[in-house]
Image (spheres, helix red, strand yellow):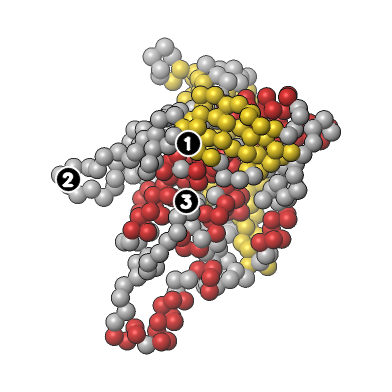
Amino acid sequence: MRLLSGPLPGARPLRGRWRQPAALAAALLASACALLFPPRYTRTVVLLPLAEQASGEYEVREDRVVYVTEGLRLEVEHLTDQALNELFGDESAQGQYSTNPYTYGDCVDPAVGYVRNRFTVFRVTVHNLGLGQVELQPLRCRLATEPDGEELEPYGLEVGSAAKTLEAYHRARRGPTGNDEYLFSRRMANARNTLFLDGQRVFRGETYAGLIVFDSLPDHITAVTLHVRGFVLKFNAYGKPLQTADMSFRFGCRVALTAYEQRAARAAATAAMRVRLREASRVSGAAAGDLTREVEAIDAYVRTRLDDIDQCFGQAFAAGTVSAGSVTVRYVILPHGGIERSEVVQSSLDNSAVESCIAARVSRWRFSPAGGADANWAPADTTAGAEPPPLPPTSGPVVVVSVFALGEEGAGR
């Protein structure tokens, strides 16, 4: 995280009566987030799968709904703000300077005594097990709420891609300083690397995962249904959709407001998880200024895929055929986001089957395209007739080395 200096975002020189100590104190209090307003409560919105849909092509797990048909597996799970904050680690603990694009981090609203929800976020994972190529169109998804019957539209990434976009949302809340511009760029890079991007075809044997984002839910909502419309199962010889399907994933909604737990207690509650990134990944070959290939953005995506590593390790760990340890994986991210190769370069597991499984899972990851390589990048605030600035720097192949701790004490942190 880059160190910030200078005035608070949007600050202006104090004149006249604002020089009075009481007025100055009030101005500082109004902008200090968790520093001066420690949280009194933890507000958690949890969407849990409803068991009633566990039939036919749908499987209901503890935290997700899975659609299974021949050659395809589609998983949908809701991510709480705590889970989203864990994706971005320390970046979510910077108060008003948090670069987590999906939550308010740890910035407390003093009017209510807790951190408000910014969005409703689902992680959607497409496993193409045997079809030629498939495509989920995230911007066609809708979130139906009960009892209101309202259908929420998802957020796109960049202005012009959808009716509501993360770029427009964060631009409208961006201050005028250079620090604010940097924070905005970091939030957009984090979003680009984790959002389920439009136009992503998933070929046979590949897995693609990303986040689909909607507005936050009012307290009175009791259930929601995520409608995935027009999922393309087959394309014709000209690349046009030939066979599509609609799927629906229903979740009950529960809002919990509890006394605030200290960070250590929350960390202990997640310690049962078996896999974590032991340290920041090492990245080489990234173009200077390409925020999509900065280590923070890469690791944010990697944290969304820790389940892949856990699936390789967990069963063997439970069976006693592998002990806790660490695995170091080196992989190459190509400009379009795919993995050219992945290999385990160091391991203390002494289990070749688990190590091979981990390397294979990593090889199926799909990062966002480098820089502005995914086509529709354009600044939102260019003046009419002015020449737009050049595309952001775009990296070539980037080598990443990630170290995973498996089964060790505190692996959930």
Residue at x 26% of width, y 39% of height:
390
| Mark toward the start of the polypeptide (2 vs 3) | 3
Relative to 183, 409 lies left or right: right
Instruction: Work out whether 383 lies above or below 234.
Output: below
Q: Are marks 2 and 1 in contact (CB under 8 Å)?
A: no
Rendering coords of residue 270 (x, y %): 71, 51
Which residue is at the far right?
320
Q: Residues within 10 Å of mark 3 (few under 14, many from 20)?
A: many
Rendering coords of residue 6 (x, y %): 37, 67
Instruction: Work out whether 283 lies above or below 86.
Output: above
Residue 315: which quarter of the image?
top right
Q: Residues within 10 Å of mark 1 (few under 14, many from 20)?
A: some
Label 2 sits on residue: 386
| Mark toward the start of the polypeptide (3 vs 1) | 3
Give the amino acid type for the residue marked by disc 3 in the picture: Pro
Instruction: Work out whether 303 lies above or below 82.
Output: above
Marks 2 and 1 sit apart, C-alpha to C-alpha, by: 35 Å
- Which secondary structure lies at badge 1? strand
- Which secondary structure lies at badge 3? loop
Label 3 sits on residue: 101
- Of circles 2 and 1, which is in front? 1
Give the amino acid type for the residue marked by disc 1 in the picture: Ser
Give the amino acid type for the residue marked by disc 2 in the picture: Ala
Q: Does any portion of residue 282 appear in the rendered image?
A: yes
Label 1 sits on residue: 284
Instruction: Work out whether 173 lies above or below 317.
Output: below
